[in-house]
Image (cartoon, rainbow, N blue to C red):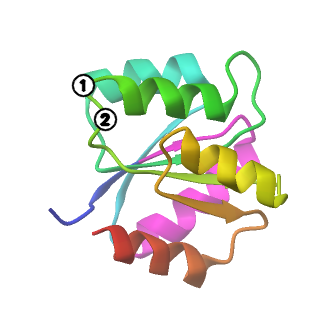
Amino acid sequence: MPIKKVLIVDDSPTERYFLTDILVKNGFSVSTAENGEEAMTKIKADKPHLILMDVVMPGQNGFQVTRAISRDPDTQDVPIIICTSKNQETDRIWGLRQGARDYVVKPVDPQELLAKIAALG
């Protein structure tokens, strides 16, 4: 199924705007959430085709939210790409172990992000 609806989960308004801008200009429909709780509510209300997940957020971090999504039978088929400033290899491995399909380090390169989304679609 082609990816059209993307949910961006990030507590930074600047980052949400930046990612939304890249995706909308490339034909995606985008919704956003500021934290893990809001993300879970939005995912259940209107299931996205892809989730871009920040790691460092208030409340649940992105690793915890990713794990919750990937273990829930209703949402486990939604691919997650972690977008974070955490650039250690151990963070990347941990993110993928929580159920993320891919991992992108901020600042996000638009072409790299679009290529990773295309690879999932």
Start-end of magenta stretch? 7-26
Determine whether the residue tagged by mark 1 lies in a helix, strand or loop: loop
Q: Could you tell me if the residues under marks 1 and 2 are in contact, i.e. CB atoms within 8 Å?
A: yes
Q: Tag 2: residue type?
A: Gln
Q: Which mark is residue 25?
A: none
Is the residue marked by circle 1 packed among few (<14), some (14-19), or many (20+) residues within 10 Å? few
| Residue 22 to residue 29: above or below | below
Is the residue marked by circle 2 packed among few (<14), some (14-19), or many (20+) residues within 10 Å? some
Residue name at image x 67 percent, y 53 percent? 93
Q: Name the magenta segment's main secondary structure.
A: helix
Which x, y percent locates residue 110? 60, 77
Q: Which residue is mark 2?
A: 76
| Residue 3 to residue 114: above or below | above
Which x, y percent locates residue 22? 54, 70
Determine whether the residue tagged by mark 2 lies in a helix, strand or loop: loop
Left or right: 17 as drawn, with respect to 65 = right
Residue at the limit of the structure toward the left, as seen here: 1
Residue name at image x 70 percent, y 69 percent? 108
Q: Quadrant of the C terminus?
A: bottom left
Residue toward you, 57 or 71: 71
Residue name at image x 79 percent, y 60 percent? 89
Q: Which residue is mark 1?
A: 73
Left or right: 14 as drawn, with respect to 79 = right
> How far apart in space, not on screen, are marks 1 and 2 (Cα)?
5 Å
Q: Tag 1: residue type?
A: Pro
Which x, y percent locates residue 2? 20, 66
Which x, y percent locates residue 63? 64, 34
Q: Quadrant of residue 77?
A: top left
Q: Quadrant of the N terminus?
A: bottom left
Residue name at image x 23 percent, y 25 percent? 74
